Amino acid sequence: MRYAMAIDTRKCVGCGDCVVACQEQYDIPAGYCRSWIAEQVKGKYPNVSMEMRSERCNHCADAPCVVCCPTDSSHISEGGIVLTDPDLCIGCGACIESCPYDARYFDPVNGNATKCTFCHERVAGGKLPACVEVCPTYCMFFGDLDDPNAEITKLLRERDYKTLKPEMGTEPHIFYLS
Amino acid sequence: MNEELILYGKNNPHVVPQLEVWGFPISLYLFLGGMAAGILFFTSLFYLLKKDKTMPVPYTRATYIAIAALIIGTIALLFDLHKILNTWRLYTHFDLQAPMSWGAWTLLAIIPLAILWGVPYKFSFINEYKWKNRFETNVAIFRKPIAVLLIITSVILGVYTGMLLSAFVARPLWNSNFLPILFLLSGLSSGIAVIIWLNRNSLERNIFRRIDIWLIIFELSLLIVYAIDLFSGSEAQVSAIRQLAGGEFAFLFWMMVIFVGLVIPAVFEWRELRGAKIPTYVAPVLILIGGLAFRMIIVQAGQLI
């Protein structure tokens, strides 16, 4: 199993519901977030294009945060989900420094380095991640890349897509459809 | 135009807008660790070259400075951890790929080694105890293996302080293979600075001055190669090195690192070799200031881009 997410940048309106759903789901302290909305504007009027992206941890196959973690707290768990084990975390900050996407932060309550978990408990229970579930424009797709019949694999077969900062060589698992 | 902005969310403190997870304690530790590595490297090297009778300083007071630097550096490192009570987790296994794991195990090895190395010399305040002599003779038998182990661990410590930063692909200023060698050279030079500073024998000082001038020449050349390497790289690498060459950190970098930390002390040491009368402490103090400034600037600037 290789869980991944595809986000349709043509449908996303940047409402931020995914950000709030995540904050609600995990009781994230005020001022912190595990996902965010980026807007990219290209070109010069009248030839302008705009892209909206809901961004979060990319759950890289070759994750730098997992490599640099001295205690193996950061690990790749079942389904390729990158997780942190709070029991092992010493709060050194190496993973935060190593992330090309700046997806991690120190939890102000317990000092753990933390980030998006792809809602692994929800997914194990057969549900979708909170952000995907609430998306009002249905622009987010979550599924297993190894399953040829999943909606996400069909979309990635049929449409153009990109990943963020591919030059970092991290093999991200979040795909942006264009 | 190609503009990217964050519309919603992403305001995690210390990560956005600018990464500032590692600060002064880390720079201080990198500096003190490098300096201690330098001192311990030269004391054990000169012991193995059988210079310990004619050149006593590195084996006595300088070693105590190295022990103190290692302990202060480790304390700085520990208090930078957000979960200090979990520190023992570093020692439940060894991760070959994680520089910090190497560092944790190296510190665990080098601190006791340095203490064993320093103990047999002139601890006059415990001279009256009988066990002290017995302990000294026992340690003395193992001096050679301890020296060999110290050389190995001090080189690992010196290189690892740079490797800790250079392993991060996401930070272009750090992600250079020259950084570990630069940090090692700078650490050796800082170690020599301490040895010269504590030394009252001008012949011995001159030997170390000669080594130090060569180290500084190597370090300057390597800094140039490091800069060329980044300037000829990707856009991110170019903007990273621009911060030091002509941007936000340019004044500090050129002033504190290049002139105060490298060029001026090298010139002073060269003049002193020629017999000029300059107070002994001037060049070492400048080198140490430059070494700390180098770590601080690299740690700070590396997180900005």
Image (cartoon, rainbow, N blue to C red):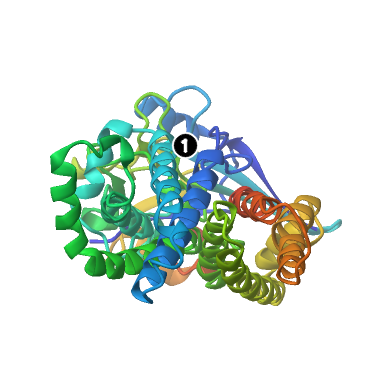
Q: Position of residue B297 (x, y in %)?
A: 65, 51
Q: Nearer the viewer, residue A115 or B305?
A: B305
Q: Quadrant of residue A79?
A: bottom left
Mark 1: amino acid: Cys
Measured along the vertical axis of the image, is residue B188 above or below residue B12?
below
Q: Position of residue B89 (x, y in %)?
A: 22, 43
Q: Quadrant of the C terminus of chain A?
A: bottom right
Q: Nearer the viewer, residue A28 or B232?
A: B232
Q: Position of residue B109 (x, y in %)?
A: 26, 55
In the image: residue B134, left or right of residue B251? left
Q: Quick one: label 1, few (<14), some, or many (20+) residues within 10 Å? A: many
Q: Is residue A161 visible from the viewing direction of this image? A: no
The residue where tag 1 is placed is A18
In the image: residue A168, left or right of residue B131? right
Q: Position of residue B242 (x, y in %)?
A: 76, 62
Q: Residue furthest right?
A: A45
Measured along the vertical axis of the image, is residue B47 above or below residue A12?
below
Q: Residue at x 28, y 61 (%)?
A: A2
In the image: residue A162, left or right of residue B155? right
The chain that hosts pointer 1 is A
Tag 1's secondary structure?
A: helix
Q: Nearer the viewer, residue B170 or A166?
A: B170
Q: Quadrant of the N terminus of chain A?
A: bottom left
Q: Residue at x 35, y 68 (%)?
A: B151
